[in-house]
Image (tube, grey):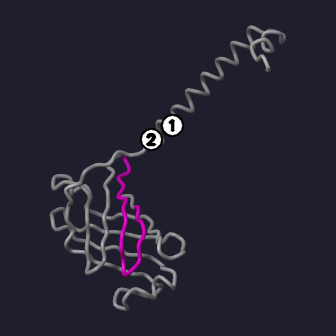
């Protein structure tokens, strides 16, 4: 086995080199721990009537369809009020043709953009936000903080997948 202590001690200025190495290792460990702490996951925040106002506004993110192979789709969401029932809309931008073909014609615009309106959003007992439009269903968890986030899953016109938004 390689003896680092002995090797460093026998080098020219061995004690000094050993102390310098120990110091560099300590600084390295400190930097790694700072990175790990800064990457800590955001804490889930229960949606309540009192914090609905923080959800109102424009959100942008990505929709990933798990039931059809495709790239994530740029998605914008607007929550237009801060009371229950929550209202707003979701716009999926430039959907791939196989996905866009399943949406009703009145929901699509040029460029395979689809807008889904919702007007009956509710808060669950678990503190998540649920929006429904016909058979379409979206449930999102709120993560408060410096960069608020909404993350969840959906069922849109026979497709399933996940969504993730950050507040604009």
User: Which mark identifies residue 155?
Assistant: none
- Which class describes the residues within 10 Å of circle 2: few (<14), some (14-19), or many (20+)? few
Q: Quadrant of residue 49?
A: bottom left
Q: State the residue lying farthest toward the front.
A: 1
Q: Marks 1 and 2: in contact by CB < 8 Å? A: yes
Q: Is residue 100 left or right of residue 140?
A: right
Q: How many marks?
A: 2
Quarter of the picture containing the N terminus is top right
Distance Cα–Cα, label 2 vs label 1:
6 Å
Which residue does the numbered mark 1 point to in the structure image? 36
Which residue does the numbered mark 2 point to in the structure image? 40
* 34 and 56: which is toward the camera: 34
Q: Quadrant of residue 2?
A: top right
In the image, residue 142 above or below residue 103 = above
Q: Which residues are magenta?
A: 146-164
Q: Is residue 70 left or right of residue 160?
A: right
* Residue appearing at x 36%, y 77% in the figure: 156
Q: Is residue 99 left or right of residue 91?
A: right
Task: Please check the rendered image and state whether residue 90 is part of the magenta-colored stretch, yes or no.
Answer: no
* Residue appearing at x 51%, y 85% in the figure: 97
Q: State the residue lying farthest toward the bottom.
A: 105
Q: Is residue 134 left or right of residue 145?
A: left
* Residue appearing at x 34%, y 73% in the figure: 90
In the image, residue 164 above or below residue 105 = above
Q: Position of residue 146 (x, y in %)?
A: 36, 46
């Amino acid at each position: 086995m390689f003896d680092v202590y002995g090797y460093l001690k026998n080098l020219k200025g061995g004690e000094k080199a050993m102390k310098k190495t120990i110091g560099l290792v300590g600084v390295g460990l400190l930097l790694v721990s700072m990175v790990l702490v800064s990457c800590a996951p955001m804490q889930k925040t229960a949606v309540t009537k009192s914090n609905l106002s923080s959800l109102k506004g424009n959100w942008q993110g990505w929709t990933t369809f798990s039931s059809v192979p495709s790239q994530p789709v740029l998605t914008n969401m607007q929550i237009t009020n801060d009371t229950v029932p929550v209202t707003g809309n979701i716009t999926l931008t430039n959907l791939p043709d196989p996905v866009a073909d399943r949406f009703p014609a009145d929901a699509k615009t040029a460029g395979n953009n689809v807008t889904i309106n919702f007007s009956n959003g509710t808060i669950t007992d678990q503190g998540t936000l649920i929006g429904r439009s016909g058979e379409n269903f979206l449930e999102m968890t709120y993560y408060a903080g410096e960069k608020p986030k909404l993350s969840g899953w959906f069922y849109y016109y026979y497709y399933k997948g996940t969504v993730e938004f950050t507040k604009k």
